[in-house]
Amino acid sequence: MKEPYENAEDGYRGYPSKTDEKVYELILTALQKKRQLLAHCNGDAAADQFVTQFEKAHREYPGYSTCRPVMVHAQLVRETELKRMKALSMLPSFFPAHIWYWGDIHIENFGMRRAERISPAGTALRLGLPFTLHQDSPVLKPDMLMTAWCAARRITRSGVRLSENERISIYEALKAMTVNGAWQYFEEDRKGSVEEGKLADLIILDRDPLSVPADEVKNICVLETFKEGRSVYRKEQTQNF
């Protein structure tokens, strides 16, 4: 991170897992092989390192496609880096459930100023930067409706609201997990939205997440799941793919 943890001894702020030179080398390899690159960047210094080295590689080899690189977690990414990411067609994939499950710990470790801006989906939305949302299973169960609730409410377990400006609507949260999720992996021509000719990957819910109060979204139940038009799950009766 660019700043130490709160009350850290000797100014401890974590450390990079790779040097700038190694990050650049890996990015260049991905560009040359036309491979999409996904990198975990939790701290703001890590986010800056990834963007800076990607900019350097793409500036030196402008003919290479960036292949929609993904910054996974992007927990403390700053607005300055989000703007630079847009120019690279780089997506952040946020883990907003951190706010509910570990938000109070983040306040303790980072202080309120930094904790408030974790998973800044609202800023990305205002910048017109596509983003996705994910769960870090098996750290947590893969409950995407809970993820949507966390992104829309930004409430910690103790009831602290982390930045009203970073909240997004349930609609935008669902879009991040469907339309944007398909675009992230170059699958927008066959997944992500309900259109003729696309795979019929669908779920049936017991309530409309766009009609119920946002507080109730995490309690919505999946009644049935379809994979390519075939029912693969029904409530109380699970079928194998």
Image (cartoon, rainbow, N blue to C red):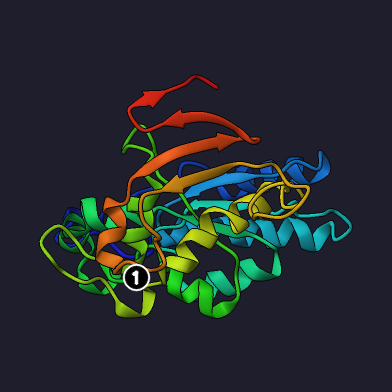
User: Total label count?
Assistant: 1
Would you place residue 198 above or below residue 13 in this image?
above
Is 52 in front, or is 186?
186
On screen, residue 148 versus residue 188, left or right, reads: left
151 and 59: which is toward the camera: 151
At which x and y percent is residue 164? 30, 79
Tell me where residue 137 sits by quadrant: top left
Quadrant of the rendering where the C terminus is positioned:
top right
What amino acid is labelled 1 in the image? Arg
Describe residue 205's horizontal placement relative to residue 193 as left or right: left
Seen in the picture, residue 199 relative to 211 is either above or below; the reply is: above
Image-quadrant location for residue 161: bottom left
Name the residue: 26% across, 60% down.
216
Q: Residue at x 60, y 60 (%)?
A: 51
Horizontal arrangement in the rendering, residue 95 relative to residue 31 (left or right): left
**Where in the figure is residue 99, as x and y percent of width and height?**
27, 58
Secondary structure of the residue carrying numbered label 1: loop
200 or 39: nearer the viewer: 200
x%, y% of residue 3? Answer: 32, 65
**Is the residue 86 above or below the residue 10 in the image?**
below
Residue 148 position in % (x across, y down): 38, 58
**Residue at left offset 22%, top offset 65%:** 155
Q: Is residue 13 visible?
A: no
Say which residue label 1 marks.
Answer: 117
Q: Considering the image in quadrants, where does the N terminus appear?
A: bottom left
Residue 29 seen in the figure = yes
